[in-house]
Amino acid sequence: MTAATIPLQMGGSATSRRPAPRLSTQIVVFQLAIVLLIVGGGFAISFFRARDDLDARAGQQSLAIARTVASIPAIVHGFSAAHPAAVIDPIAERIRRMTGAAFVVVANRQGIRYSHPNPKMLGKSLLHDPGENPQAVLAGRTFVGAQPGSLGRSMRAKVPIRDSHGRVIGLVSVGVLEKSVSARLAGDLPVLLIPPLLGLLLGGAGSMLLARRIKRQTFGLEPDEIATLLEQREAVLHGIREGTIATDALGRITLVNDEAQRLLGLDADAVGHRLEELVPRGRVADVLGGRVGGSDEVILVGDRVLVANRMPVDLHGRRIGAVVTLRDRTELEALLRELADVRGLADALRAQEHEFSHRLHVIGGLIELGRLDEAVQLINRSSLMQQTLAASVVGHVGDPIVAALLLGKAAVASERGVELTVSAGQALPDDLGDVGGLVTVLGNLIDNAIDSVASTPRGEGRVDVSLDVVDHELVITVRDTGPGIDDAFSEEIFRDGFTTKVAAGAARRGLGLALVSQEVRRRGGRVTVANDGGAVFTVSLPLAGELVVT
């Protein structure tokens, strides 16, 4: 993904397609649709259950009436009368009006009706009506169910009528018309509608509140705008040259870009882990974890010099996490230290220029006074000191960069009133491997030694530098006559950020010996410190290949 693929205007072109409904509108519509489906389904189930209940109640009511009619003695005796209908119909009609049934029909075994709400149906057979099948009832069984009839479809019950000997002599059919059941259901409908309408109202209100909450949490952005912002963030995050890490309030990584993974050596699955658990302990963890404050903090991670900034993130007055940015200053730091060395050398050369100017004035005065022998002696003594140092360094140190460094440091030491001597047990090989790393080791050790003895009275401070080859290893020894190193700090002095000196201005203290330790580890060597009339640093660096000593 690159920044060039990101649209410049969020939401696309309004002329190319119809804009989609707003997220809040979609949420409300979808929620209402879901609520409506649920409420509608619930209402349908309730409606049919109520209808079934009313039908069942109507059937049981009809059955109870039918059994009552079948047990009335006057009805049973009416079957043996000369005109059964004249006896049975008044009784049945009276019962029908009292119970509210649609019909109470009494018939003999041949299906001839002896009672009916419609007098015209008296004496006619019910066997001709559609759906009538009285054979099961005449066989002694009871029937309850919905059937069509002369008055319409009804929920009816049929019961056999028995004489005093238990013989089936006829049947009684009692029914409630379905339109009456429907009318009763329509009367109950308002009660049935209250729960669905209440659910629909609550669902709509909840959908509105949910839509407002989501809109507030997304800062009023629409889904396509959120997607565009995410694409832009990913493009920017992985396109910048600085490492960026975001953590939550508990220090867990929530976001890390490619550069941060490269600089800190993190895996792709670092998200979700605590940052302090994935970085080296000590100053690196303290800076990245926020225990060391300040801006542009220099830290050492592996063989890299990084500048770290940690900015806490607060939202509505509450700490929600932090953002850490990292810049790789490995090459820049090396250039800055070289620049500092060059500036120090330039200052030393300016001081020597003044010193040589004074000597020339002295020599000129001696010549004007005619004391030529003393002038020659002064010239030879000054020249001999410089030639001896240059010959000692150049004769034993084959690499011109290392030799130049030692001569430059000697000039700096002389300007600060410190005597610096360089010795070598034997001539060093021309190929010393990574000369830049060797310059880092020598330069920092000599600088620390000069700083250590610079506070002593002028002329009493001394720094001895020794280079030798022992068992295919380059052994560097830097000894000074300063106060030495406290044994309790013999390991701590090589840790990044540790220093016993007071920082001057914006100078970064506690980095020099850490760089020495880093370079020595990188080359597979070792460094030790001891006290012997001052601090004694010893560095052993393996030399590649077979050394030829001449």
Image (tube, rainbow, N blue to C red):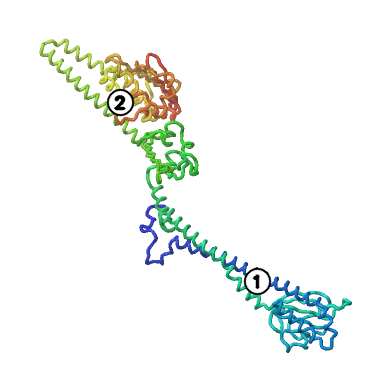
Q: Where is residue 33 in the image (x, y as percent from the top left)?
A: 52, 65
Instruction: Please tell me whether residue 94 is drawn above or below residue 404 in the rendered image.
Output: below
How many numbered circles does the render carry?
Answer: 2
Q: Look at mark 1 in the image and give the residue it sits on.
A: 51
Q: Can residue 9 be seen in this view?
A: yes
Question: Crowding near pointer 2: few (<14 within 10 Å), some, many (20+)?
Answer: some
Q: Which of 170 and 409 is in front in this view?
A: 170
Q: Look at mark 2 in the image and give the residue it sits on.
A: 404
Q: Where is residue 14 in the image (x, y as percent from the top left)?
A: 37, 65
Which image quadrant for residue 331?
Answer: top left
Q: Can residue 136 be seen in this view?
A: no
Q: In this view, does 198 lie to the left or right of 378?
A: right
Which image quadrant for residue 300?
Answer: top left
Q: Which of 82 and 297 is in front in this view?
A: 82
The quarter of the picture where the C terminus appears is top left
Q: Which amino acid does label 2 sit on?
A: Ala
